[in-house]
Image: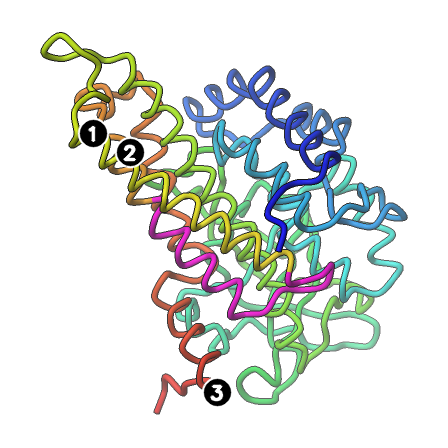
Amino acid sequence: MDFSLTAEQKMLQDTARRFAADELPAHAKAIEENDTPPTLALRKRFAEMGFMGINLPTEYGGAGLGHFEAVLILEELAKISVAVAFPVFEASFGPALAIAHFAPEALRQRILPKVCSGEMVVAVSMSEPQAGTALTDLKTTGKRDGDKIILNGNKRWCSGGGHADAYVVYCRLSDAPGAKGIGAVLVEKGTDGFSFGAPESHMGWRGISSADMYFDNVEVPADNIIVSAGGFKQLMEAFDLERCGNTTMSLACGQSAFDYALAYVQEREQFGKPIIDFQAVQLQIAQMKMKLDAARLLLYRAVNNAEQELPSIADSSIAKCYANEIAREVASAAVQLMGGYGYSKSYPMEQKMRDAWGWGIAGGSIDIQKINIAAALVGRRFNQRA
């Protein structure tokens, strides 16, 4: 088993790292201070670099590379900030992949080139006020009326809500109970009857918009169906890949916090010597490094085992769960190592800690990943309603 990167992968990683260091810090600072999403100009710059839709086919404007290459690029961008990297996350691991895998060809041709050019942002809309982890309890409906689908209901906790140009909306497309009635439809912003609540204000993730979404007799063409009723399993298979993107964003939070702390402890002096010379600091640094390396290997296993398809729920859940937990631990340890400087908003560490917490909530909580892992081990799903 070879753990080294190819020459091409190293070049790609280095390109993304240099680009991120040279061009993204000013954007990241503005996003954090103003709580505004990345601009269209920045998305187009990502597209010029070939970062939007890295793992989407070239016929739709993507780079045609693998999920592994997408992970390498995303981590380098997200080390600057997860918000500044969010358009690349959405284009490479988010709803764009569900469209690429399952949507009718005409819909792929209409949407994906705009995503890859940076012109369009697509978000996924899954959760509802009473359906988050219990996603099959969702109540938003899409009723067929000739060549149209009419949607009614409301959604919550959509990353990109209110800002994105289009939404992959999970909804009930038939009267069949539970997962059997669920599919997904593309709804574009500005469609009559489609509205948003007030923007959410979160502890972290500044610049990643979120707002309640309301569907009041919203009509969309039946051709906008991405997955028909009964395709819930397909949707969740695509979501297994999004978990790998979530893992990467967690890893980037932890790795960037570690990098900053490692430089700090070699420069900061107390009692006449750098604090790295104290054994207690050495132990902390070693623990942080081990956790990050383990998380990265679990992520790489999940993406490589996918072999250009979709990863298993077990591999993606293990990777996400572990990275979510250690990102919080590493960022917290980095804040402690930096003392007052870590707690000050004048330095980036407190932001890293706040952002790290979000990834263990979004995309399926840490605890639900552990249930997924146990289910995979015994070969059956657990009935939480029994």
Q: Is 344 located above or below residue 303 in the figure? A: above
- Locate residue 12: give its quadrant: top right
> What residue range appears in magenta?
305-327
Q: How far apart are marks 3 and 2 (CA)?
A: 40 Å
Q: With 17 as the anchor, is 263 left or right in this view?
A: left
Q: At 76% from the left edge and 63% from the top edge, which residue is drawn?
A: 101
- The amino acid pointed to by label 3 is Arg
- Are the residues at dot 2 and dot 1 in contact (C-beta closer than 8 Å)? yes
- The amino acid pointed to by label 1 is Val
Q: Residue 285 carries which label?
A: 2
Q: Is 256 located above or below residue 241 in the figure? A: above
Q: In which quarter of the image is the C terminus?
A: bottom left
Toward the front, the furthest residue is: 1
Q: Which mark is residue 263?
A: none
Q: Which of 179 and 256 is in front in this view?
A: 256
User: SS at mark 1?
Assistant: helix
Question: In x, y percent, where is residue 17?
Answer: 60, 25
Q: At 48% from the left edge and 64% from the top edge, which residue is drawn?
A: 317
Decide: few, some or many residues near mark 2? Use Cα within 10 Å; few <14, some 14-19, many ≥20. Answer: many
Q: At 55% from the left edge and 19% from the top edge, which residue is drawn?
A: 21
- Are the residues at dot 3 and dot 1 in contact (C-beta closer than 8 Å)? no
Q: Distance between the residues labelled 2 and 1?
A: 6 Å
Q: Nearer the viewer, residue 205 or 370?
A: 370
Q: Which mark is residue 380?
A: 3
Q: How far apart are marks 3 and 1 (CA)?
A: 44 Å
Question: In x, y percent, where is residue 385?
Answer: 36, 87
**Is residue 149 within the magenta segment?**
no
- The amino acid pointed to by label 2 is Ile
Q: With 338 as the anchor, is 321 left or right in this view?
A: right
**Is residue 314 within the magenta segment?**
yes
Q: With 272 as the anchor, is 276 left or right in this view?
A: right
